[in-house]
Image (cartoon, helix red, strand yellow):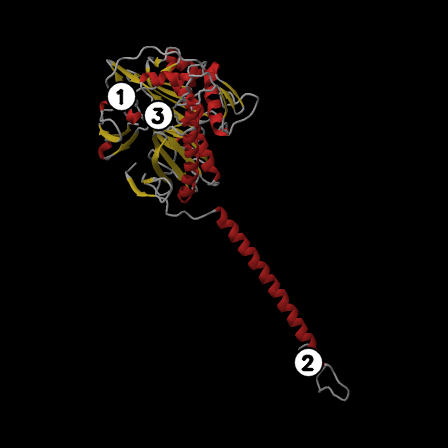
Amino acid sequence: MATATRVLPAAHEWAVIDIGTATVGVAERDALGTSARVAAWPPYYLARVLAAVDAELARLDKEASRFRNDSEISAVHGSGVESHLLSEGLAEAIAVALAAAEWTGGLVDPTVGGALEALGYDRDFAAIPKGGGVPPGPSHVPGWRSVRLDGRRLRLAAGSRLDLGATAKGLGADRAASAAAEVSSDGGVLVSLGGDIAVAGEAPNGGWPLLIADEQEPASRAPAGGHHAVRDARRGAGQMVRLAAGGLATSSIVCRQWRRGDRMLHHIVDPRTGLPAAGPWRTVSVAAANCAEANAASTAAIVAGDQAAAWLAGQGLPARLVARDGTVQLVGGWPATDGGLVEAPAARRMPPGLRGGRHMRWAR
Amino acid sequence: MDQDYEERPGWVRLPGYEEAPYPRGASVRADGARRMRRASNWTAAALIAGVAAATGYFAHHQPPATAATSTVTSVPGGTAVNPQKPTLNGPVATSGGSGVTVTTGPGGVKTYHYRDN
């Protein structure tokens, strides 16, 4: 991957990325508090694919970002009432989050929003003070069963605050990939939102090559805010794999860290304690039928701790777990060799996003 | 114009008329016109079929914007390579949690790009 070479004339500034071949078009831009990367073939579909992705990202950001005062979820949080009639999109996003909670036995829980804010993650990560303050104590998490969703009707206890971080980026990648595939009928697309990846259409020969990065040092030790690069061959080499269908997501306690008092915090909260998960894994990558499911599973694995590998294997999900000491454990058929194909299961493991048998758009 | 060749009262056929090696005028003209119409019809049909076939072909086989640069002939698992699909050797995206990307430079040195947001 090389640096950006030109900028597409789009509503959002997508920088075209040169990956050393003209057979695939690749572009990247900031989105949803992280970076979005899109790959498409044939490359002449790229402009229309980016337009489709733009529309989906804008929709999700307006619906579910708790860092935007004008988002729909911020309006729900600030309304002071318990009953809400949601847009179709936010209802879907919350339904997926609740389905993930049910599937993981509550290890992934959208009602950790209040706990995250108590930890200091109440704004875009770049704006969080990386030090100072006092160590936070345990927070009460209302629990996902306290949320009632019936179609577009939401009942949320006053004071409860939702955080859809464990599923929303995955859902966004799924939505964007589906929309992009509709405008590139005889090709293939890949959408990555901060490393949560969904593919649709026809994959390149052998699948889309992906690098599974394995971070060893907290990003907070580097200058805060914006981009920075570190050249260091001693860092974890990671692994290159290939993905032909479905989704792949990685959750890590290393990338988003900040300090309160003498304690280093991260953004994956254990709903049982309201504090950052303290399990043995620093990074977990999972492949699943769609990216929302992969996203939920990788986050749940971080929280599940010692039980994670057995749970993932029981679900039949290919996964790569990296312990805090760097030990790598592969389960569910995750390839041991560099460049191996990760065969995501075709069937979903997570229950449908809405009760009553209604199938959601993301549920491919 | 066929009436130009009709026999009229008082006309006398030239000697050897019946032995003429060619058909008579009216029928010659009519046969020629029929042959031309048949030929034109076949030509038009062939052209229409050709244009339709070419349109269909190019609708489904758009030429690439640029020539493929990948030359790999095998992919992991030994699966057959579809020449109409790209074959990629390097990663197109990184999954590392929250916006980390990695590039590999000369000598295999990896550069980690962080997004602290």
Judge depth for marks 2 and 3 and give the one in front.
3
The residue labelled by disc 3 is A337
The residue labelled by disc 1 is A216
Label 3: few (<14), some (14–19) or many (≥20) C-alpha neighbours in 10 Å: few
Q: Which picture quadrant has residue A224?
A: top left
Spot occupied by residue A303 in the image (x, y as percentages of width and height): 38, 15
Residue A236 vertical position relative to residue B29 in the rendered view, above or below: above
The residue labelled by disc 2 is B20
Between A104 and A236, the one lying in front of the other is: A104
Q: Looking at the image, which residue is at 67% across and 71% down?
A: B31
Which disc is residue A75 wearing? none
* Amino acid type assigned to the residue bearing label 3 in the image: Thr
Spot occupied by residue A56 in the image (x, y as percentages of width and height): 44, 34
Secondary element type, mark 1: loop
Q: Which picture quadrant has residue B35?
A: bottom right
Label 1: few (<14), some (14–19) or many (≥20) C-alpha neighbours in 10 Å: some
Q: Looking at the image, which residue is at 36% across and 26% down?
A: A67
- Can the viewer see residue A77 in this picture? yes
Q: Chain of mark 3?
A: A
Query: Could you tell me if the residues under marks 2 and 1 are in contact, i.e. CB atoms within 8 Å?
Result: no
Looking at this view, name the residue that lies furthest to the front. A80
- Count how many numbered circles sit on residues in the image: 3
